Amino acid sequence: MTENASSIEIHLAFLHAQPSFASPPFSVTTTTAPGVDEADWQALLVGGGNSVAVDATSLVHRLYGPLCAMRNQGPCAVAHLAQSLDGRIATTCGISRWLSGEEDLLHTHRMRAIADAVVVGVNTILHDDPQLTVRLCSGDNPVRVILDPEHRLDGSQRVFRDGCAPTLLLVAADRIGAEHQWGQAEVIPVPRGQQGLDPFEIRRILALRRLSWLFVEGGGITVSRFLAAGALDRLQITVAPVILGSGRPSLVLPEIHDLTLSLRPRTRRFLLGDDTMIECDFAPSPHHR
Ligand SMILES: NC(=O)c1ccc[n+]([C@@H]2O[C@H](COP(=O)([O-])OP(=O)(O)OC[C@H]3O[C@@H](n4cnc5c(N)ncnc54)[C@H](OP(=O)(O)O)[C@@H]3O)[C@@H](O)[C@H]2O)c1
């Protein structure tokens, strides 16, 4: 890969010759400034991922076209985590900025722009105080959904005060008093499941509000619970060439004792600057439906 002040070569390769992803590897060169392919991005948003509008030679269209098109196939949930080579998403004390590079950050904003709602766990709000808005590309802000079953957040965080996007605070039904608002956020009761809040119940409650395309942005516990429940359609892991040696784990799932029980989804791979993003597709193969 070549890199200088004005250009980054981004290679895009689909390693698995699965029918749904069968495409030859190819590479494109673009400038380092995030958003240089903004025109492609805007065309994709306008086309809504329809195949007639998707330009197969465009990196943006090839990465995001299939994700936009999922909107036509019913409710979906796509998660993303950026992790180190040794599987950490943050230091032990919770610092995660900026583990991955600016291309992955832009990617995260584009995923927000595609989504109806962005979902994060309470620890992410406590540690990062994120805005969860679309600022590095064009597109609408998603509704912000915070999973805080024990009602730990005090309302001082930005998502409760900045008015940038509608915000929903999902709290275990047994922890809610009379309050319907928390700062500017609407408080939504969710019945407890066997392990915290059932991700499918979360998806159902959000779908009733016409929030059908969900971007689960972290952290590790939140994404792990969605994955363990089988409630993710796709999972994107961006691996940064960094070793932390300690820190908060990425995915943690129930222990298995046999490799035949491991998950082996179909994948797509993208190089995002120095980082590698691997997208797992958990939908049944078209040949096994
Ligand atoms: N590298 C990345 O991609 C990335 C992305 C986001 C965040 N981060 C970093 O990751 C750290 C936070 O991640 P984390 O794994 O510690 O926590 P997290 O996923 O942000 O939040 C986990 C907490 O959210 C609640 N929660 C989430 N899903 C739930 C469910 N299905 N049912 C019930 N409760 C649920 C629980 O709260 P209770 O404990 O109150 O039950 C749980 O402990 C921060 O340091 C942040 O900076 C990194």
Image (cartoon, rainbow, N blue to C red):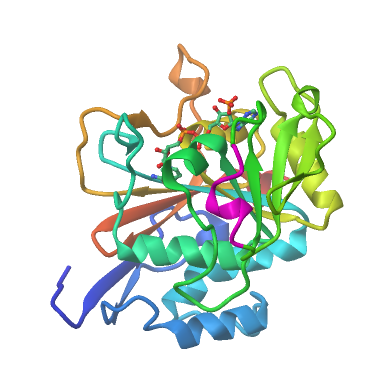
State whether the magenta stretch is mostly helix, strand or loop: loop
Q: Image quadrant for the C terminus?
A: top right
Work out whether residue 228 or residue 203 is closer to the camera in this orientation and state it: 203
160 part of magenta stretch: yes
Q: Image quadrant for the N terminus?
A: bottom left
Task: Find residue 84 and report its image quarter.
Answer: top left
Q: Position of residue 269 (x, y in %)?
A: 39, 56
Task: Find residue 86 and report its image quarter.
Answer: top left
Q: Is residue 266 above or below residue 45?
A: above
60 part of magenta stretch: no
**Which residues lie in the magenta part?**
154-162
Residue at 79% from the left image edge and 22% from the top image edge? 174
Task: Find residue 81 and report its image quarter.
Answer: top left
Q: Position of residue 53 (x, y in %)?
A: 62, 85
Total numbered circles: 0
Residue at 54% from the left image edge and 54% from the top image edge? 158
Q: Position of residue 143 (x, y in %)?
A: 68, 58
